[in-house]
Amino acid sequence: MSLFISLEERNRIADALHRDQAPLLEASIDEAVDGKVSYADLETGLTIRIPFVDGMRVDGRYHVVLQSVDGPGRFGMGGTIQEANQDIVVDVPADRALGFQGQQAALYYFYLEYPVEETKSPVVVLSMEGQIYKPVVDEAVDGMIPLPVVVQGVRLRIRAGSSLTPGALVSVYWWGSSADTCFVKHMVIGPGPVEDLVVPVGADFLVPIKHGTVRVIYTVQSTTGTRVSPVLELGVAGDLAVPAGIHQQGQETRSVVYLSAISEGGSYPFRLLTQGMVAGDVVIFFFTGYRLGSELVIRHTVKQSDITAGLIMFGVPISYLSLQESAWVWSMVDRPEGGAVGSPDLPLFLVSPSRSGGQCL
């Protein structure tokens, strides 16, 4: 049997129910210390802890989220409360935890038995240590290099990750969307405490690409191997805004090439014509997918036989499943006498092996 009640009666009942419902508390990660999680802990997995509060109940539904605020890392897990007055514990496996390395991550959860406007917990932001971090342009704002600093130059910062050990070789690749706005810098880490590396970037590498794009990646080579950073991509502000149609849908973009994910000897094959190269040049081939860990940098010293053949072949040994269908390739040439030049970039959409008839990598 049900009864119709007045608004006043409805509010009185809701208030009575609400008195037994405590506000949700922040979730935490057991391994975090002062808001930071070490790389060693990422390697063994993480433990998320949700405090049980008055108003929760056994079989109550929850969903916890760990979401990167500056990268692709994401973990989500739902479930039901199994025991009253006990913290809810959610384990993050090591392979998922490592997807957050070098990033800031927001931790929160939903308790789905509360009223909709009260289901979300407070958000906690944690810093995940990385062996190598995404490069940073100090002056960038919301993914854009602002116009006032375009004409002054910027500071490119390589944060001091644990891979920057004394004696390590660091190679920084700055690619601008005009061929002559590219450069390569090589540095060796000296003895003593390691600090951030700061590379001044002059206006001559920015002004010619107003309304264009900058892409930065670096490698760290040491006795323990070679590591590749995530890719930083920034827009470069221009003098005028882009006109926009009142009824347009989406943005105009460059054409995307559809690439069949077919393996040849365990890798995706690419060719690069040697036009504009001479023997002794170092050509650098870049490949990156959406997911962390899909970055690839291949260096090749150009030989006379390459010039004679007219092309250089590169193989990309990366799993199709790690790319989430989208990828980008581009190249640069580092001249022995100094200076660098870059190719246009190529956005790719990878066609599923089942659709292309090829073998999945």
Image (spheres, grey):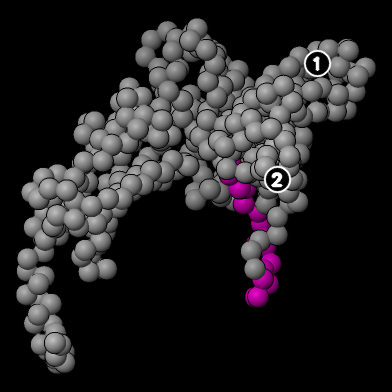
When the figure is inspected, residue 297 is found, relative to residue 204, above or below; the finding is above
Where's residue 252, x and y in %? 70, 59
CA gap between label 2 and label 1 equals 36 Å
Pick the residue in front: 26 or 144. 26
Callout 2 amino acid: Arg
Name the residue rendered at 67%, 42% in the picture: 354
Task: Tell me where residue 4 appears, x and y as whole percent.
Answer: 16, 92
Q: Residue furthest front?
A: 1
Tag 1: residue type? Answer: Val
**Range of magenta residues:** 232-248
Asked if the magenta segment contains residue 234, the reply would be yes
Of residues 77 and 358, the one drawn nearer to the viewer in this rendering: 358
Q: Which mark is residue 355?
A: 2
- Position above or below: 114 against 319: below
Residue found 62% across the figure and 44% down from its top:
325
Q: Is residue 37 above or below residue 279?
A: below
**How many labels, in total?**
2
Q: Residue at x 51, y 44 (%)?
A: 140
Read off the residue under disc 1.
302
Is the N terminus in the top left, top right, bottom left or bottom right quadrant? bottom left
Secondary structure found at label 2: helix
Residue closer to the observer: 327 or 162: 327
Could you classify mark 2 by the number of other residues whose Cα lies within 10 Å: few (under 14), some (14-19), or many (20 or more)? Answer: few
Secondary structure found at label 1:
loop
Magenta run includes residue 283? no
Q: Residue at point 8% right, 82% down?
A: 12
Please say whether residue 196 is visible from this viewpoint. no
